[in-house]
Image (cartoon, grey):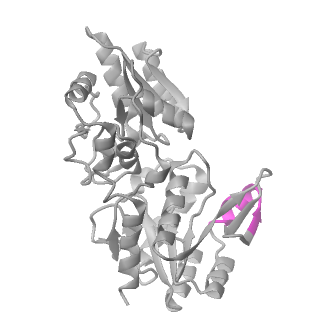
Amino acid sequence: MRALFIHFFDFAPHSGISKKILYQVEALRQCGLDVDLCYIDIDKYGTQRRMCGEVVIDNFGNGLYAKLFKWFKFSNLTRHILKVRYDLVYIRSFYNTNPPLLRMLKTLHNEGIRVVMEYPTYPYDKETEGASLNYAIIFLLNRIFRKRLPGHISRIVTFTDLERIEGIPTINISNGIDFKSIRLRIPRKGNTNFNMIAVAEIHYWHGFDRIIKGIGEYYKEEHSEEVNLAIIGEGTSDIINSLTKLVSDYGIEEHVRFLGFRHGEELDTLFDDADFGIASLARHRSNITKIKTLKNREYAARGIPFIYSEVDEDFDYMPYILKAPSDDSPICVKSIIDFYKSLKMTPEEIRETIVDTLSWNVQMKRVVDIIFNER
């Protein structure tokens, strides 16, 4: 059986989303499917092309036309899918439902091709607020036309426990891990400081301001240990400026570092130096209470204890998890240190808790089994 995985963007080596998609594609192949990947290729001149495997489906050129019309031109892609006769089309949604996309979905559905759409988060409207003009148009059209999705796709893949989204039955999975690609951390001996690490493509719902405030308050009081935080990743200039200003206001510049994107051996080394992970601390700001984030699973695969504030049923009762209150209060750093000192699990033991349940092979097999057993 043949499958096409559709992604509406290009790929970047530092991007967790890019890596996740490649792991999902490989997991589908491990499930026995012959999978092609459809994505946007951008060359050094800014020319954008829609690719399906090695086949050029559309050449959008560059400039405004390329940035805009790739969201509305699906006729060539539809013809390609029908020509190849894929059995499954798996779409990673960018919340971009519009009339041309609906026409493609309707055609595929009428031709008996199974179509599923993955919603990375839900609800998502709060996350799309404040988008740039071109994305604001996309999200506005999505709000208007998403109600027409029922009857066009078979299932929505979701990382929630919802049985239906947009009136469409769901397949409930967790974000997974490709364990071969994530090295278990090797705690560096001789560390005398307490080092924390926060890795993300930084958004306001990560709530890193909460941990920065916590560090600032910690240093205001009498303390016995030096605490440091390495923030790995980038965000908009507004959010980075607000976080760096907060660091400056507290006078903790030597304890909080913004390191930008890191990957490969460099990221491995940063985890070796770290004692504790900082995951999302403010999902409530995007109106999400339950979610199964990729970062929680990556931390567990690294073998590092961590803190988060949302509900994640795969981790809420794990002994290496510290739950933060779901509000905007500063994080109590002393409570993190006390929790860490009471924890006796090794990195190997932490990782072992998810090996049998949270691999991408296990999660994507659930999708394949449900889709191909429905008819």
Q: Nearer the viewer, residue 144 or 125?
A: 125
Which residue appears farthest toward the right when viewing the image?
A: 45
Provide residue 42's location: percent of width, then percent of height: 72, 56
Tell me which segment is drawn in magenta: 59-71
Residue 221 inside the magenta-drawn segment = no
Query: Residue, x 27% and y 30% (percent of image)?
Result: 329
Provide residue 295's location: percent of width, then percent of height: 40, 46
Provide residue 203's location: percent of width, then percent of height: 45, 41
Query: Residue, x 45% and y 38% (percent of image)?
Result: 199
Residue 126, placed above or below residue 207: below
**Residue 43, picture quadrant:** bottom right
Q: Nearer the viewer, residue 64 or 302?
A: 302
Residue 134, placed above or below residue 277: below
**Which quarter of the rendering shows the C terminus?**
bottom left
Q: How many marks?
A: 0
In this picture, residue 94 sits left or right of residue 216: right
**Residue 374, picture quadrant:** bottom left
Provide residue 135's location: percent of width, then percent of height: 57, 56
Residue 180 in view = yes
Residue 69 inside the magenta-drawn segment = yes
Residue 116, placed above or below residue 224: below
Residue 261 in view = no
